[in-house]
Image (spheres, rainbow, N blue to C red):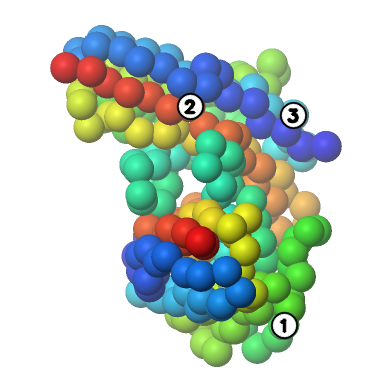
């Protein structure tokens, strides 16, 4: 069964600090891995998408890494801001035939305090 | 990219009633998806809305409870029928586009059933 596990479940940091969120997966056959940011009361917004051959991708202060051998990904947030307070969701997609089948993690709830 | 709007953004409904949620996309898409996100949980796929044919439902979801319409390539509706408090959740519309199948989400509809 395809699974995506995220850790920690929640995290509180001070503004300006860095943090790293983890995502472990057992999804096969692997197609891509995406990190989403979901603000409270909003739909998820894509931060990064990585395929098998990519091991790092940045989007501003967000840097995602992918180790396809260990089936692990991380999302590093640099110099956190209050607006980074949100839920971060890891989504891993399998490709079966012509269809993409996403498996969603439960998300990491990040709170940035001033 | 794709810009998705949903109506209503939130609603409070009484037990036993039904609510229809609308999803509008700014471009034509082949497949539209409806998700449910319960508090503290990951997104769960309810069904795939196919234009010109019946929706495809995931295990645990049935058409009588969640009827879906897809009259054209930019619009879909999800009805939550005979609601109970257990249906209180965020309902999200989503589409997939592009060669890497980027997935876009609407802002969600927050439903509370009393």
Position in image of residue B4 (x %, y %): 38, 66
The subunit carrying tag 1 is: B
Q: Mark 3 lies on which chain?
A: A
Labels 2 and 3 in the same subunit: yes
Check chain identity for marks 2 and 1: say if they share one.
no
Q: Name the quadrant containing residue B8.
A: bottom left
Relative horizontal placement of residue A9, taking residue B3 as reference (left or right): right
Q: Which chain carries label 2?
A: A
Q: Is the residue marked by circle 1 packed among few (<14), some (14-19), or many (20+) residues within 10 Å? A: some
Determine the residue positioned at 59% across, 58% down. Answer: B85
Within 10 angstroms of label 2, few (less than 14), some, or many (20 or more) residues?
many
> Farthest left residue?
A114
Residue highlighted by disc 1: B54
**Depicted B83 relative to depicted A108: above or below:** below
Q: Is residue A51 above or below residue A64?
A: below
- Quickly name the residue at label 2: A108
Q: Residues within 10 Å of mark 3 (few under 14, many from 20)?
A: some
- Is residue A56 visible in the rendered structure shown here? no
Q: Looking at the image, is mark 1 or mark 3 nearer the viewer?
A: 1
Mark 3, residue position:
A26
């Amino acid at each position: 069964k395809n699974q995506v596990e995220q850790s920690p479940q929640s995290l509180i940091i001070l503004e300006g600090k860095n943090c790293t969120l983890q995502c472990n997966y057992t999804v096969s056959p692997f197609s891509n891995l995406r990190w989403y940011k979901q603000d409270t009361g909003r739909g998820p917004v894509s931060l990064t998408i990585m395929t098998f051959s990519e091991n790092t991708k940045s989007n501003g202060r967000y840097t995602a890494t992918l180790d396809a051998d260990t089936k692990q990904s991380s999302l590093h947030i640099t110099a956190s801001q209050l607006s980074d307070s949100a839920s971060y969701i890891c989504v891993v997609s399998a490709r079966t035939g012509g269809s993409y089948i996403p498996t969603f993690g439960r998300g990491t709830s990040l709170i940035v305090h001033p | 990219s794709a810009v998705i709007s949903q109506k209503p953004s939130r609603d409070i409904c009484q037990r036993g009633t039904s609510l229809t949620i609308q999803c509008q996309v700014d471009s034509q898409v082949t497949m539209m998806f409806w998700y449910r996100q319960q508090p503290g949980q990951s997104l769960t796929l309810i069904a795939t809305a196919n234009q010109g044919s019946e929706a495809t439902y995931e295990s645990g979801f049935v058409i009588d409870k969640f009827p879906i319409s897809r009259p054209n390539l930019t619009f879909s509706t999800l009805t939550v029928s005979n609601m109970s408090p257990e249906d209180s959740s965020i309902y999200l519309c989503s589409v997939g586009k592009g060669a890497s199948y980027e997935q876009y989400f609407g802002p969600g509809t927050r439903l509370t059933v009393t």
